[in-house]
Amino acid sequence: MMLTLTAAQCREVRMPWSALIANKAEEFWVKARGRRIKGQGMIGAPAARVREGFDSLRWEDFGHYNLPQAWVERRQIPVVLNGRVPVVGAVVLDLGCGPGTSTEVLCHYADPSWSITGFDLTPHLIEVARSRVFRNREGRPISPRFECQDISEPLVVGGVAVAGGSVDLAISGGVVGLYLSPGQAQRLAAELARVVKPGAFAAIDAGPSVSVERLRAIMEGAGFEQVGIAKSFVIEPRPKLVFERRGPVH
Ligand SMILES: C[S@@+](CC[C@H](N)C(=O)[O-])C[C@H]1O[C@@H](n2cnc3c(N)ncnc32)[C@H](O)[C@@H]1O
């Protein structure tokens, strides 16, 4: 049986517009005074600059920098999950999970039988994620694992490669379209083609670094078919494209 969510359940995790507007207004005033916001300059930058940027972004500054992404995720993730993951025993990968900001939304809708693994490049963010307590919407504890690694490299959990054809949903928000090059996205797509079950899903964000058209071409080339799109609002600079893994379903 697949997880189905009502419109009201999808809205449970939303952040208010006022939080997004306040964040953007603050950013505007910082830039209007000729100053830079903390973390500025990483979008579309080479991998080494992205790594260095997130390494040096202090925890409290990450919260401010990431708020627009957290706002988007809390609208997109329920849409992606709805009808696409088993109620029991789902295997879910959160690719570029930060300090667990997107993972906590996945956990909200999870059953304790799910296996959720968050991957992120940045050691201090993974440390924060590992220290956190996650609960689902019924208040039951959910225990995701966290791995510190580049998602454009083969995915490894507990020192073991993620098993081929084992994943029900691989989801990535605010990472591929912002910080990965098309070459890195292509390597990720090849790995997702290996680990995602035939008939199961990958939901990946497009953006300035990897456009919607580019991402679609990369994923189709790897054996996926686009079956949906998740937007946080009508105007959406970083939509998640939802892909189904082609191939015989066992
Ligand atoms: C904007 S945050 C998004 C965090 C989370 N997914 C969310 O939606 O709140 C981007 C995250 O991607 C991570 N990241 C960037 N490039 C990466 C890569 N190549 N491999 C793994 N993580 C990466 C950063 O460390 C950072 O935590």
Image: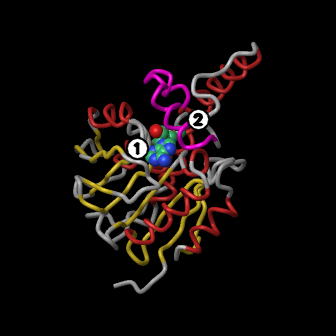
Residue 14 visible here: no
Q: Residue at x 31, y 56 (%)?
A: 156
Is ligand 1 within 8 Å of the beta carbon of the residue shown at mark 1? yes
Q: Is residue 202 above or below residue 151?
A: below
Q: Residue at x 31, y 53 (%)?
A: 116
The question of residue 9 being in magenta is answered with: no
Report whether 201 appears left or right of 230. left
- 46 or 228: nearer the viewer: 46
Q: Is residue 65 above or below residue 80?
A: above
User: For the residue labelled by badge 2, is the local secondary structure a helix, a strand or a loop?
Assistant: helix
Q: What's the mark number on residue 68?
A: 2
Query: Mark 2: few, some, or many residues within 10 Å (few <14, many ≥20)?
Result: some
Q: Amino acid at mark 2?
A: Pro
User: For the residue labelled by badge 1, is the local secondary structure a helix, a strand or a loop?
Assistant: strand
Q: Which residues are magenta?
A: 45-65
Q: Quadrant of the N terminus?
A: bottom left
* Relative image position of residue 222 (x, y in whole percent): 53, 73
* Relative image position of residue 189 (x, y in whole percent): 50, 65
Q: Amino acid at mark 1?
A: Asp
* Relative image position of residue 201 (x, y in whole percent): 46, 67
Q: CA distance from mark 2 to mark 1?
A: 18 Å
Query: According to the image, label 1 marks what residue?
Result: 120
Q: Residue at x 54, y 25 (%)?
A: 64
In this view, the residue farthest toward the top is: 33
- Whether pointer 2 and pointer 1 mark residues with C-beta atoms closer than 8 Å, the reply is no
